[in-house]
């Protein structure tokens, strides 16, 4: 019995040690990702001489609050800027949660370790979806963002788009259609994993009257 008890104690200590190692690894990854994202953000800002006040609907067919089914070639491509071999479309800011991060034009798990990424859509067509790891220095804070909070997106050409948070919901990993529903009323969606990684937190945003 004593031997079994000792084995259980050893196993318990090993589990605690493993959990501690994982915690430290995740914390270091978050810190590294935050530092890298800050460096890239500063490089992007250096290329934007001055934010340009611009109508977010300019140049795109807009009809009674919904995007027209225009031909793909009629919709302008989002400008990008390349840094360290990766292309970025702009900078996302959620001031109330201390978020100010660059956004890559394409996503994969390697890119997500550096910065949030565009999952689908475009700010030109009012269906931009941005995903990010739930690092403390990346998208973890959006899980508690308040409804009505301000969100801005500064494109690499200097155009600034203003949004407000209209809804926050939990989405299953398999509910891709729900996440990127092109017929929805939302103009911007931000999402990340909830604790445990089994569900996603989706923050839905609407363009405000502050055309910029």
Image (tube, grey):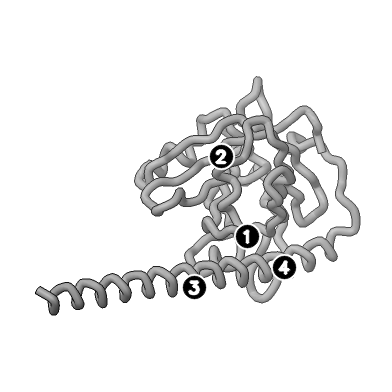
Helix, strand or loop for disc 3: helix
Residue 203's disc number: 2
Residue 40's disc number: 4
Location of residue 98 with respect to 206 vertically, above or below? below
Q: Nearer the viewer, residue 163 or 34?
A: 34
Helix, strand or loop for disc 2: strand
**Position of 193 compared to 135: left or right?**
left
Pointer 3 local density, CA inside 10 Å: few below 14, some 14–19, many at least 20: few
Q: Which of 187 and 148 is in front in this view?
A: 148
Query: Which residue matches tag 3?
Result: 25
Q: How far apart are marks 4 and 1 (CA)?
A: 14 Å
Location of residue 155 with respect to 148 vertically, above or below? below
**Position of 154 compared to 52: left or right?**
left
Q: Which of marks 2 and 3 is nearer the N terminus?
A: 3
Residue 210's disc number: none
Q: Nearer the viewer, mark 3 or mark 1?
A: 3
- Residue at 74% across, 45% down: 95
Query: Which residue matches tag 1?
Result: 137
Q: How far apart are marks 1 and 2 (CA)?
A: 17 Å
Please provide percent x and percent y for residue 94. 70, 46
Asked if labels 4 and 3 touch by Cβ distance under 8 angstroms, the answer is no
Q: Distance between the residues labelled 3 and 1?
A: 14 Å
Q: How far apart are marks 4 and 2 (CA)?
A: 24 Å
Q: Which of marks 3 and 1 is nearer the N terminus?
A: 3
Pointer 4 local density, CA inside 10 Å: few below 14, some 14–19, many at least 20: many
């Amino acid at each position: 019995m004593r031997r079994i008890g000792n084995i259980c104690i050893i196993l318990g200590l090993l589990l605690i040690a493993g959990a501690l190692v994982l915690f430290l690894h995740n914390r270091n990854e978050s810190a590294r990702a935050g530092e890298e994202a800050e460096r890239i953000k500063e490089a992007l800002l250096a290329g934007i001489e001055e934010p340009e006040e611009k109508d977010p609907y300019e140049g795109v067919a807009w009809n009674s609050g919904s995007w027209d089914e225009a031909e793909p070639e009629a919709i302008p491509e989002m400008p990008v800027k390349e840094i360290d071999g990766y292309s970025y479309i702009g900078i996302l800011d959620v001031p109330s949660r201390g978020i100010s991060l660059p956004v890559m034009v394409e996503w994969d798990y390697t890119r997500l370790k550096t910065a949030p990424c565009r999952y689908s859509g475009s700010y030109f067509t009012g269906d931009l979806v941005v995903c990010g790891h739930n690092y403390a220095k990346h998208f973890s804070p959006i899980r508690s963002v308040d409804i009505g909070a301000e969100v801005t997106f500064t494109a690499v050409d200097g155009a600034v788009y203003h949004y407000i948070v209209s809804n926050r919901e939990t989405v299953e990993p398999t509910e891709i259609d729900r996440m990127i529903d092109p017929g929805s009323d939302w103009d911007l969606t931000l999402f990340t994993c909830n604790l445990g990684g089994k569900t996603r937190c989706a923050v839905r945003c609407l363009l405000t009257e502050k055309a910029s």
